[in-house]
Amino acid sequence: MANYLKRPQGTEDVTPERINKWKTVEKVTRDIAESFGFSEIRIPTFEVTELFQRSVGETTDVVQKEMYSVIAKETQFTLRPEGTAGTIRAMLQNGMLAEALPQKVFYQLSCFRHERPQAGRLREFHQFGVEMAGPASPYADAEVILLGKTVLDRLGIKDIVLNLNSIGCPKCRAKYQEALKAYFEPHKAELCETCQERLVRNPMRLLDCKSPEDQAIAKDAPVILDYLCEECKEHFELVKSALTSMGVEYVINPKIVRGLDYYTKTVFEFITTSIGAQGTVCAGGRYDGLIEQLGGQPIPALGFGMGLERLILTMEQQGCEFFAQNKCDVYLAPMDADAKPVALQYANALRDMGVRAEFDLLDRSFKSQMKYANKLGAKYLVVLGSNELEQGRGQIKNMETGKQHEIRLDSAANFAEDYSGISLAEMFDTEAS
Ligand code: ATP
Ligand code: MG
């Protein structure tokens, strides 16, 4: 096949056959975010590259290796690798942070990262994310985590573990970074090239390295929880007790440091074992320094991103239910050229009544129209032949039960008047003969 006929590596087509899965996760995430008082925000697909360098962080994998950037007319732009930076940029630019806080927004958007494609890891993927700006309270952390948990529960996902950690504030992290440096220094020569640089610039990033050799070295590294200052410790305790009071179970996982630089205090991931190695379906935390770092007031904030492909993959693996496919309610079968414009009128009268109606557009034979109506899963069939049109009445057939019901076919307007405001079953199944 010619190259231009193949989709780029690490991207996906969502064909109509699978679209119901996307509609399911899009609707459920939106409904739940709105029930928690979050409003939708939409931001550009690309931003000035510097935004990501300054927020996600220069020493992260995302910025060092994974960004899709272009130079257009001397400005460098990057396709968003995540949603937080653009969202905070939009909050700042639109004066949202000068309004009553908290600001609570959610988004459903595509992200782009140049990674090695594999199951659950794409180059274009989609996130449902929420961001809350304003509250320093640990109850906000609990609320955001609860939102994520509610989504997973509502979708019917099981066996998913909430992994919780605190990575402290810049104050406690300074001491921790020193301890990490001291720990890794003797192993410097064995570390991968990137990590040798990280050792100097940002030792905590070493814990996030995917190389098995480096992971083995990092196994006994000091853990951040032992270095938390009083304030961070108390915050973490309150988050944990709030979650416990809501019946949310978690495990403490000191290995979770998150792949982006802007996090502080609480970080978390919901991890499933159902979809292999890329099991983190939802990841997030607090990023109290980010807004100020980007030139705003020192306003604390937090949020998460949920990978929609991984979410759907998990649901498929676990046999969770998706919304039903869009189906045809009534299929109209015109038998000759004269019946076509009549079919068009009745189809439209039905649509005005909220009924999904279709008719033959391909001049098919009666037999192949029946085949097609079956393929569409049509619930009812109306045959429009010359007899029916002459007599001004015909039959509507319930395709499942085979029962027929007489209907008037003298004019689409009369038909609409007779049946408006009644459900399909009430219309056509009540006195079925
Ligand atoms: P990972 O450790 O899997 O690389 P990450 O730390 O890079 O994840 P985040 O930047 O926190 O991930 O993104 C939030 C969520 O977005 C992830 O938990 C995951 O569900 C999803 N995600 C991230 N990268 C990809 C990708 N390349 N393909 C599909 N989903 C992804
Ligand atoms: Mg990653």
Image (tube, rainbow, N blue to C red):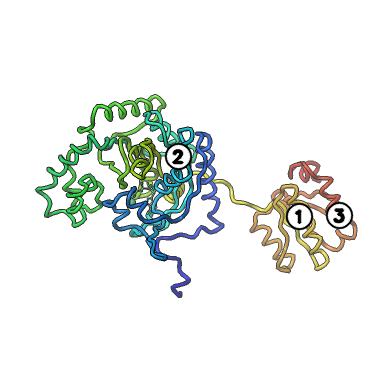
**Residue visible at 88% across and 56% down in the picture:** 392
Q: Which quadrant of the view contains residue 290? A: top left
Distance from disc 2 to disc 1, alpha carbons, whole Å, reads 39 Å
Mark 1 and mark 3: Cα distance apart in space? 12 Å
What residue is shown at x 45% (from left), y 39% (from top)? 152
Give whichever of 210, 261 is nearer the camera: 261
Q: Are marks 1 and 3 in contact (CB under 8 Å)?
A: no
Q: Which residue is mark 2?
A: 152
Which secondary structure, mark 2?
Answer: helix
Distance from disc 2 to disc 3, alpha carbons, whole Å, reads 50 Å
Q: Label 1: which residue?
A: 348
Residue 324 or 90: which is nearer the viewer? 90
Residue 430 placed where, x, y %?
A: 78, 41
Q: Which residue is mark 3?
A: 411
Taking the view exactly as shown, the residue that stands out farthest to the right is: 391
Q: Residue 184: which numbered mark, if any?
A: none
* N-term-proximal mark, 2 vs 3: 2
| Identity of the residue drawn at 50% across and 34% down | 36
Can residue 220 be seen in this snapshot?
A: no
